């Protein structure tokens, strides 16, 4: 059996009958940038997130960067976030002119540890301006204590919800919990376009209006530039695709949750494997289904030989990347992140995944664990090889 990590072809088959006429209409009317499709998507996604405003942009990275800029984050400021995230989070910080400061994660959820956030503010930060909690793998970070700490220290909170479309935190939709929430619509996301795309949501009209200018070369109206901005607009065809998919997102997220529950049930019999726990305050949408296991590389190779595609999110923490050597956080700086990074493996996860496929994946993991134990008894096991 061959099991893809993600099956976008299966998703496309469900919506082809709507997507093709939409694209044909866009080509016939020549409306490719902005226009009614973008405006309609912004209204619909704002409603979905329970916010007053949504501003569509070119990517999740732009959403984060523009949000920071609109909140006045700039040169010399420090923005706190986690090292266990995609580099887009910290790129946005650096490109706004600020400096990223890392905070270690909670070992159960792999999200920002609020206690370590408070410690970091007391010991390591001179010019804090904002904090970006990342709702990693589709599960919201523990926002109440983060918001309390931020309020106490006068910090802006920007939610990186790029993996959490439709997730809930204590009944609040991800992206609506703080001043502004940012989303990516990269094709592999729970709500993905047919290319790059992003958005931010907020209840702050002034912030939304500022981002609308920033995304469109700083224009307040055509050819009148109040500020220098960026070319960061959402394309009309991408907005049309997102509108079609948004109608199905709740059902797709429910299917992901069912698949995660089945994985949890089957994997609970394997003591050598742990899976990311869903916190009591959260409703995860399982953008990724991530396990932790010793000899992660060996397991990944074994699964590949069985026709099972997997992913690594993320094998080298940001503070150890060459791009951030100048920050000076060497190995050992964030022990929880570093330990987990060596053990993380993302298993196939998409709404169309079947129980039969999940059973095949788990059976293969059990076979690997059994063979590893047998090899260890015979003294023939080495990490990465059976």
Image (cartoon, rainbow, N blue to C red):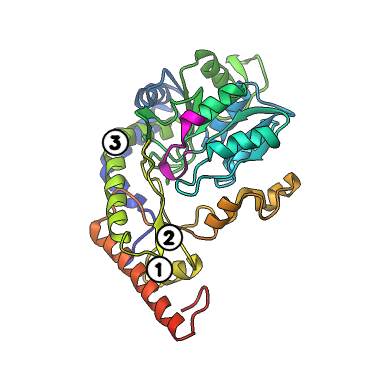
Q: Residue 130 at what x, y percent from top left?
A: 61, 28
Residue 21 appears left or right of 309: left
Q: Nearer the viewer, residue 55 or 376?
A: 376
Q: Nearer the viewer, residue 112 or 310?
A: 112
Q: Which residues are magenta?
A: 135-145
Badge 1 crowding class, 10 Å Cα cut-off, few under 14, some 14 to 19, many 20 or more, is many
Tally the marks. Answer: 3
Q: Tell me where residue 246 sits by quadrant.
A: top left
Q: Residue 378 at what x, y percent from top left?
A: 45, 86
Q: Badge 1 is on which residue? A: 303
How far apart marks 2 and 3 lie (CA) works out to 25 Å
Residue 330 appears left or right of 308: right
At a point 73% along the width and 28% down the height, the residue shown is 75
At a point 32% along the width and 38% down the height, the residue shown is 19
How far apart marks 1 and 2 lie (CA) works out to 8 Å
Q: Is there CB contact under 8 Å for labels 2 and 3?
A: no
How far apart marks 3 and 1 lie (CA) works out to 30 Å
Q: Is residue 144 magenta?
A: yes
Q: Badge 3 is on which residue? A: 250
Q: SS for tag 1?
A: helix
Q: SS for tag 2?
A: loop
Q: Residue 174 at what x, y percent from top left?
A: 42, 31
Badge 3 crowding class, 10 Å Cα cut-off, few under 14, some 14 to 19, many 20 or more, is some
Q: Is residue 25 magenta?
A: no
Q: Earlier in the sequence, mark 1 or mark 2?
A: 1
**Dot label at residue 310:** 2
Residue 163 appears left or right of 249: right
Q: Earlier in the sequence, mark 3 or mark 1?
A: 3
Q: Is there CB contact under 8 Å for labels 1 and 2?
A: yes
Q: Nearer the viewer, residue 314 or 241?
A: 314
Q: Nearer the viewer, residue 120 or 201?
A: 120
At a point 37% along the width and 23% down the height, the residue shown is 50
């Amino acid at each position: 059996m061959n099991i893809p990590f993600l099956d976008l072809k299966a998703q496309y088959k469900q919506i082809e009958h709507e997507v093709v006429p939409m694209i044909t209409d866009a080509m016939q009317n020549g409306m490719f940038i902005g226009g009614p499709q973008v405006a309609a998507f912004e209204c619909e996604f704002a409603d979905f997130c329970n916010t007053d405003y949504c501003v569509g942009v070119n990517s999740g990275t732009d959403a984060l960067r523009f949000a920071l800029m609109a909140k006045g984050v700039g040169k010399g400021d420090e923005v706190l976030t986690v090292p266990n995230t995609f580099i887009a989070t910290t790129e946005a910080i650096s490109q706004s002119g600020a400096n990223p400061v890392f905070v270690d994660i909670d070992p159960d959820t792999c999200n920002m540890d609020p206690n370590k956030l408070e410690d970091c503010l007391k010991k390591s930060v001179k010019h804090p301006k904002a904090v970006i909690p990342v709702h990693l793998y589709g599960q919201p970070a523990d926002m109440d204590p983060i918001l309390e700490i931020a309020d106490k220290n006068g910090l802006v909170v920007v939610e990186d919800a790029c993996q959490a479309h439709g997730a809930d935190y204590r009944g609040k939709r991800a992206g609506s919990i703080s001043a502004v929430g940012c989303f990516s619509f990269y094709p592999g996301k729970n709500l993905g376009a047919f290319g790059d795309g992003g958005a931010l949501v907020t209840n702050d009209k002034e912030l939304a209006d500022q981002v609308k200018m920033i995304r469109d070369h700083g224009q307040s109206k055509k050819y009148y530039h109040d500020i220098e901005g960026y070319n960061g607009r959402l394309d009309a065809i991408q907005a049309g695709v997102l509108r079609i998919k948004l109608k199905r997102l709740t059902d797709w997220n429910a299917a992901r949750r069912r698949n995660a529950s089945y994985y949890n049930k089957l994997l609970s019999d394997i003591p050598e494997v742990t899976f990311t726990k869903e916190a009591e305050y959260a409703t995860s949408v399982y953008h990724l289904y991530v396990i932790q296991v010793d000899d992660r590389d060996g397991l990944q190779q074994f699964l590949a030989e069985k026709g099972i595609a997997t992913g690594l999110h993320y094998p080298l923490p940001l503070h150890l990347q060459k791009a951030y050597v100048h920050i000076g956080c060497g190995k050992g700086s964030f022990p929880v992140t570093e330990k987990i990074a060596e053990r993380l493996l993302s298993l196939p996860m998409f709404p169309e995944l079947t129980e039969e496929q999940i059973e095949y994946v788990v059976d293969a993991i059990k076979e690997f664990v059994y063979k590893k134990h047998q090899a260890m008894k015979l003294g023939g096991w080495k990490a990465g090889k059976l």
